[in-house]
Image (cartoon, rainbow, N blue to C red):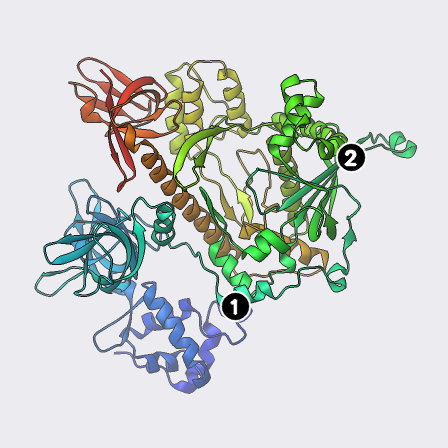
Amino acid sequence: MKKPRDPKAARGQRGRDPHLEREAARYEAPIPSREFILETLAEAGVPLADDDLARAIGLRPAEMEAFARRLGAMEREGQILRNRKGAILVARKLDLVAGRVEAHPDGYGFVAPDEGEEDFYLSAREMRKVLHGDRVMLRQSGIDRRGRREGTIVEVIARGNERVVGRLHREGTFMFVTASNRRITQDVLVEPDGAGGAKPGQVVTVELTVQPSVDARERYIQPMGRVVEVLGDATDPGVEVEIALRKHELPYEFSANAKAQASGYPARLREADLKARADLRDLPLVTIDGETAKDFDDAVFCEEIQAGPRAKEAGVRSGLRLVVAIADVSHYVRPGDALDHESRERGTSVYFPRRVIPMLPERLSNGLCSINPDVDRLCMACDMVIANSGEIRSYRFYPAVMRSRARLTYTQVAAALAASNGKAEAKARADGDSAGELHELLPQLQVLYRLYERLARARKQRGAIDFETIETAFVFDDKGRLANIVPVARNDAHKVIEECMLAANVCASDFLQMNEHPALYRIHEGPTPEKLAGLRDFLKGFGLDLGGGDEPHAKDYARLLDSVKHRPDVQLLQTVLLRSLRQAVYSPENVGHFGLAYEHYTHFTSPIRRYPDLLVHRAIKAVLRGERYTPGSWVDLGRHCSETERRADDATREVEAWLKCYYMKDRVGEEFEGSISAVTGFGIFVALDGVYVEGLVHISELGGDYFQFDAARRELRGERMKKRYRLADRIRVRIVRVDLEMSRMDFVLAE
């Protein structure tokens, strides 16, 4: 047995810490790194008590509190383990693996190891010990019949669910909650007298007092809890949002400190606020947004500029000046303050149908930071000169004060532009819609449109991919119930603003890269080799090919899309091309944006609703001051912001799915025409014409044949009758079931 080092000798061991400089840069009072702690434990060869380990790494008494916190974090993350005597062991030396439980609705599950290796399979029996989201230490117990590594849970190191939201049920004298999260498959027993007045059938939040486990005699202990919140009946207006907020753990209430900070700012700008800012209040900047928008991040102005004689002699031609003014949120939300903590935790605003969960308190998001008309607002300006070719010739960033001339909508601007081009129907619409205001601003809007045409041409030459998708909007009645689902047309005004924002975002990324300042880039990588191979196999069946070899560019995708745009199966081909690409994420490592065909790209234009944009603003300001902005680990921030974005997307998608089911619940038995929107091994999903919802035709409902799933061709093919069901095929179906609990619709083929 090795003994811990002599204390005097141990003091000098701090210099052996391989990450001493990193810890010193992060903390005012650095302590030994995790890596050095693990190395010291491994060298000891035996479990060490806390005091012995502290002496071995030369810890001082004043550092013990921070050391205890670090050990707690390492234990929660599965790097270390304690034996029955409380001594510390290195988990890896026991062949234990730490990871997060990913449950499946059918009862089994997996553990995704922290080190990124292959997942472990957990049987339904093993899953009785845990819930989805728990962190565990496990040991490999074998290989199952499908060749997957099977695991046995040794210890639960952190529980992932303190509360569960779901439907309350009664069975005899017992009450229990079935979770809305289908990955939580175990019912939660309600303690005697723990229902808190809730009635069976209501949606409730239950606080867990007992977590699931299996005792030494292999007896199953069911999770148990107390009702702490009644959300209402399942079909009450807005309950679906309340469920999503709690299910996805979305922060929806601001802390008292954050609200106090927001309310403490004066309603009007002070002289001190205007210091070192350009004055753009005489520039006729305008906002152009949707009819229901309340938070206005951006305003735009565009004018023609003529090159002087000397410039013309030097070969410089005339162009366009574009000013994109973005709300200066960083003036109000400072690093480390209460508002910064809240906005970082949220990562993004979440836009549900009829309800918004803002990243910032309403006093800022809809007030002080929102570029409302006819009030002075602080902004960060991106002032660009754009050549007639659409190339950004020059740009500069500066803090400014501005005053929006008008709050315009996409519909107004599109109608005004169409009317100015002689379209009679649009002219009549524009004449009845803020005619005076639009007439005064029309020349500027026309210049903006000319700018858009130049930028759009440059976009096409660059080879950016332009997928045509149908977006929908939910229309509610005066009682808050869904009345209709309608398509949202993307008009010229949408495209104008989109190109202006893209230009500003590109300038922001170029500015930070040129000044070698770290930042979060919005990166979008091309297809993986596996997806590319599958895509090529699919296209081969249609006599098509994607150019670019093993590393295609966005331009290759754009050319293929352009070549098939008049084919009847264009929707099918576009869908398959889109699904071959990876998801865009935030990262400090700039690898470019594949879809937009940019070598560098970041998000600058929406700091009211996206935390990465706020970080970019701070970085730009730091460069302008000759400083560096260090918010912590850029890698961790990128991962966090990507996760909060996915969390928001998942939550809104689930709410929309439930609303669509509610909308169709009284139409069971009706028949609809539709298109196959997805093909799987268990059936086909069909998107219905005119109502913009989709449901499943199970494989057992496809007819008297055995159907084989061809993943490469995205089709189900009958063995005997050779009947094929392919992505985008037209089909007629009948609705047979709408399940509000599961947010799912079941169809059968219409006879």
The amino acid type, in three-letter code, at marker 1 is: Asn
Q: Please state which amino acid type lies under the numbered disc 2.
A: Glu
Question: Would you say 406 lies left or right of 563 here?
Answer: right
The residue tagged 2 is 303
Disc on res. 201? none
223 above or below 731?
below
Q: Nearer the viewer, residue 602 or 290?
A: 290
Quadrant of the rendered image containing residue 684: top left
- Tag 2: Cα neighbours inside 10 Å, few (<14), some, or many (≥20)? some
Question: At which x and y percent is residue 618?
Answer: 63, 56
Residue 257 disc label: 1
The answer, for residue 24, to whether it is visible in the render is yes
Q: Mark 1 or mark 2, which has the lower sequence index?
A: 1
- Give the Cα separation between the discs numbered 1 and 2: 44 Å
- Position of 268 with respect to 527 (left or right) is right
User: Is 728 positioned to the left or the right of 315 in the image?
Assistant: left
How far across and down, in percent of the image, does residue 293 sit?
56, 42
Q: What element carries label 1?
A: helix
Q: In which quarter of the image is the N terminus?
A: bottom left
Label 1 Cα neighbours within 10 Å, binned few <14 / some 14-19 / many ≥20 = few
Quadrant (top left/top right/bottom left/bottom right) for the C terminus: top left
Residue 160 seen from this side: no
Looking at the image, residue 114 lies above or below residue 544 = below
SS class, disc 2: strand
Q: How many labels does the image show?
A: 2
* Residue ID at (85%, 32%): 306
The residue lying at 54 percent from left, 44 percent from top is 522
Residue 44 drawn at (x, y percent): 31, 75
